Image (tube, rainbow, N blue to C red):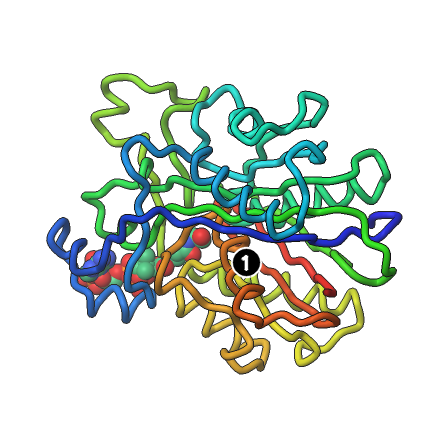
Amino acid sequence: MPTRSTVILGTGSYAPERVLTNEDLSRMVDTSDEWIRARSGIRERRIAAAGEATSDLAVQAARRALEDAGVGAADIDLLIVATVTPDYPMPSTACVVQHKLGVPSAAACFDMNAACSGFIYALDTACALIGSGRYRKALVIGAEKLSSVVDWQDRGTCLLFGDGAGAAVVGPGDKPGTGLIGTRLGALGEDTDLLCIPGGGSRSPTTAESFGRGDHFIKMKGKEVFKLAVRVMEEAARDILEQHGLAATQIGLVIPHQANLRIIDAIAQYLELPVERFFVNVDRYGNTSAASIPIALDEARRAGRIKPGDLTLLVAFGAGLTYGSALIRW
Ligand code: UT7
């Protein structure tokens, strides 16, 4: 754990303008608004413009977070972008964002790939580095253009995903016991095949054949991922509460990864918490992977659902399979 407290100084988020509704999807694949709402709780998702890349979404969210924190880009010495849809395989999206924002060249900039748990992984890393005293102010971003890796002919996946970005500015706190007070990160590497993009990496570089098979698209065994998501997120939430001697009822707001409303409902039920204690925006954005938690966190703060002194629990699960939970005292 960090040697000094590290706090979130500001948050921001951005969703592209274009809305893709379930009705729109039902004209693209054999599905219906009714089915999608019943099985996932999603009504619509945002889709980035053709010329808009992940870094463009990230920059918009980051500007809002910097403004909210009252911190200038020149003050940032650590920039982490959590994403599975980088602008390029190389260089990192963090370096592209650094240049667009005017973050100094002396800042450490890198991407982090932990899929839907990416923001919690990046937040934990930033807080540890700031807690160590080696960095002063971090910009932690979760940003995705998942529409670029979705197979729009696969009705089993295309209903779920959307584009967006969320960001947080993190720095040292002056009140002990506030900020990120604990995290629980982990991974189930034996199940990488349940949710992956099989092509385009060193295992299977893109060829005409792999492209023809659609190996560059997201593949998901939805039912298996669903069951694991419920079990593992519940465990990650329980573990961190136990570690800190807390009861679930002491949590003011749970911000779960927004993958499927049925997953959120099930976790609420197992933790014996009213679902109103969970922040939900999956209906408007679908699953935005690493962007999901920081967008929800920003919307929750701006909606006044987080007050000074409150405890917030973040919990996520995603490809890897990775998972993570985090406790924040405001
Ligand atoms: O970020 C973390 C990773 N992602 C997740 O956590 C997502 C986890 N998985 C899910 O959210 C769900 O598995 C889905 C929403 C993707 C699918 O729901 P499901 O209840 O698991 O449905 P299913 O895949 O078992 O399919 C049930 C039926 C099938 O028909 P049969 O075999 O029963 O005749 C599918 O062919 O529904 C059919 N189906 C659809 N029907 C209409 C599958 N997709 C669709 C669709 N529209 N879009």
Give the residue drawn at x 69%, y 52%: 9
Give the residue drawn at x 71%, y 62%: 328
Total numbered circles: 1
Q: Is residue 157 left or right of residue 140?
A: left
Q: Is residue 233 above or below residue 50?
A: below
Report the quarter where the C terminus lies. bottom right
Q: Position of residue 296 (x, y in %)?
A: 51, 60
Instruction: State whether label 1 is within 8 Å of ligand 1.
Output: no
Q: Is residue 265 left or right of residue 139?
A: left
Is residue 223 visible in the rendered structure shown here? no
- Give the amino acid at mark 1: Asp
Q: Position of residue 327 (x, y in %)?
A: 70, 62
Residue nearest the viewer, comparing 322 with 10: 10
Residue 216 picture quarter: top left
Which element type, helix, strand or loop, lies under badge 1? Answer: helix
Residue 310 picture quarter: bottom right
Q: Position of residue 137 (x, y in %)?
A: 73, 40
Q: Is residue 72 above or below residue 204?
A: below
Q: Residues within 10 Å of mark 1 (few under 14, many from 20)?
A: many
**What residue is shown with label 1?**
298
Give the residue drawn at x 53%, y 82%: 274
Is residue 85 visible in the rendered structure shown here? yes
Residue nearest the viewer, comparing 292 with 188: 292
Q: Is residue 184 left or right of residue 283?
A: right
Q: Is residue 279 left or right of residue 328?
A: left
Q: Position of residue 226 (x, y in %)?
A: 42, 60
Residue 246 picture quarter: bottom right
Quadrant containing ligand 1 reads: bottom left
Give the residue drawn at x 57%, y 72%: 305
Residue nearest the viewer, comparing 218 with 98: 98
